[in-house]
Image (spheres, rainbow, N blue to C red):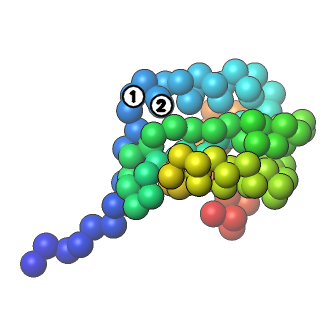
Amino acid sequence: MKPKSNPLQQLLIPFSLWHSLIKGLRRKSQGIRESGAFLLGKIGGNKVKLFVFYDNLDPECLDSCIISFDGAGFVPLWKMCEKKQLQVLADVHTHLGKVAIQSEIDKKTQ
Ligand SMILES: [Zn+2]
């Protein structure tokens, strides 16, 4: 019997969308701060349809070198999700430096 797979275990994102996301994260971080975005897709799905940068929801969240996202920023995110019938599938953010790992804070606040 084939095990049931969880569709959220593997995310799919079109290359052009991923490219735009990475380009935007690089532009926003400018190599001096972190930046990030929420990845949105259809409810119950695993394909990313669009993304929204953290600072489009909380304009001050990138004011220091680390991300400090205010909970009030979730309100416009939830409204966007409701309007477009999407959900947050994941989020992605950068760290300073060249190593791509989850920080201890990331592991504790997933
Ligand atoms: Zn992190």
> Mark 2 highlights which residue?
18
* Residue shown at the point (84%, 37%) measured from the top left: 59
The three-letter code of the residue at mark 1 reads: Phe
Which residue lies at the image location 39% right of the left edge and 28% below the top edge? 15
The residue that disc 1 covers is: 15
Is residue 10 shown to the viewer in this render? Answer: yes
The amino acid marked with disc number 2 is: Trp
State how far apart marks 2 and 1 are (Cα). Answer: 5 Å
Q: Nearer the viewer, residue 30 or 59?
A: 59
Say if 25 sits above or below 100 in the image: above
Please tell me how crowded label 1 is: few (under 14), some (14-19), or many (20+) other residues with Cα within 10 Å: few
For the point 50% across and 52% down, the residue is: 85
* Whether residue 65 is situated above or below residue 45 in the rendered picture: above
| Badge 2 vs badge 1, beta-carbon distance below 8 Å | yes
How many dots with numbers? 2
Q: Is residue 95 left or right of residue 85?
A: right
Q: Quadrant of the C terminus?
A: bottom right
On-image quarter of the N terminus: bottom left
**In the image, is 83 to the left or to the right of 73?**
left
The x, y position of residue 27, in whole percent, is 70, 21
Q: Residues within 10 Å of mark 2 (few under 14, many from 20)?
A: some
Q: Is 61 on the left-hand or right-hand side of 101?
A: right
The image shows residue 29 at horizontal and vertical percentages of: 74, 28
Is 4 placed above or below 20 here?
below
The image shows residue 73 at horizontal and vertical percentages of 79, 50
